[in-house]
Amino acid sequence: MRKGILAALVIAGVAFAVLSAMWWQAPAPVDAPATVAITLREMAFSPGRIEVPAGAVTVRIINAGSLEHDFSIDALQISPNVRPGSTVEYSFVAAPGEYPVYCSLPGHREAGMAGTLVVVP
């Protein structure tokens, strides 16, 4: 009788352990936003082509120039201003695609202050 109860308890314990392992899953990791640094200078972005993975993106925009600039992406409705000598971090979510990036201050885009944000799947 004792052997039967002991065997039943062992089988129940093993079954519980197996089922628990099957049902319990570690929480999915939360991906940190992709962070990329962009330097603004008079009439140029560096780099001019910015590549990031799809999803949450943080841009660290450094204005190393002597004029105010911004970082405009019309399709994502963003355009943070950055004063000379300042750094701004701006976060957004982007789907895969290519997005024109430019400085919207008068004459800056026309003078070459433009680039491309490439969001890859």
Image (cartoon, rainbow, N blue to C red):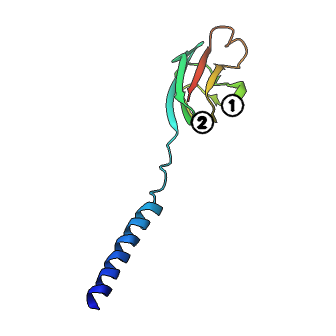
The outermost residue toward the top is 111
Disc number at residue 40? none
Asked if disc 1 and disc 2 are in contact, CB closer than 8 Å, the reply is yes
Instruction: From the viewer's perspective, tell me whether residue 12 is left or right of residue 61.
Output: left
In the current view of this chain or complex, which residue is farthest to the left?
A: 3
Question: 100 or 9, which is in the foreground?
Answer: 9
**Marks 1 and 2, Cα distance to the nearest angstrom?**
9 Å
* Image disc number at residue 90: 2
The amino acid sitting under disc 2 is Tyr
User: In the figure, 48 relative to 14: above or below?
Assistant: above
Nearest the viewer among 42 and 57 is 57
Residue toward you, 53 or 37: 53
Residue at the far bottom: name it: 1
Q: Percent from the top left, x then y, of residue 121?
A: 55, 30
Q: Is residue 15 above or below residue 116?
A: below
On the question of residue 61 being in view, the answer is no
Q: Is residue 17 left or right of residue 43?
A: left
Q: Residue at x 55, y 35 (%)?
A: 58
Q: In this rendering, is residue 112 above or below 31?
A: above
Where is mark 1, residue-wise?
Answer: 78
Question: Percent x, y for residue 52?
Answer: 53, 28
Q: Earlier in the sequence, mark 1 or mark 2?
A: 1
Q: Quadrant of residue 81?
A: top right
Does any portion of residue 23 appear in the rendered image? yes
Q: Position of residue 119 (x, y in %)?
A: 58, 26
x, y percent for residue 86 = 55, 30
In the image, what residue type sits under mark 1? Answer: Ile
Element marked by disc 1 = loop
Label 1 CA crowd tier, 10 Å (few <14, some 14–19, many 20+) = some
Q: Does residue 22 appear left or right of residue 103 in this picture?
A: left
Image quadrant in which the N terminus is located = bottom left
The residue closer to the viewer here, 67 or 96, is: 96
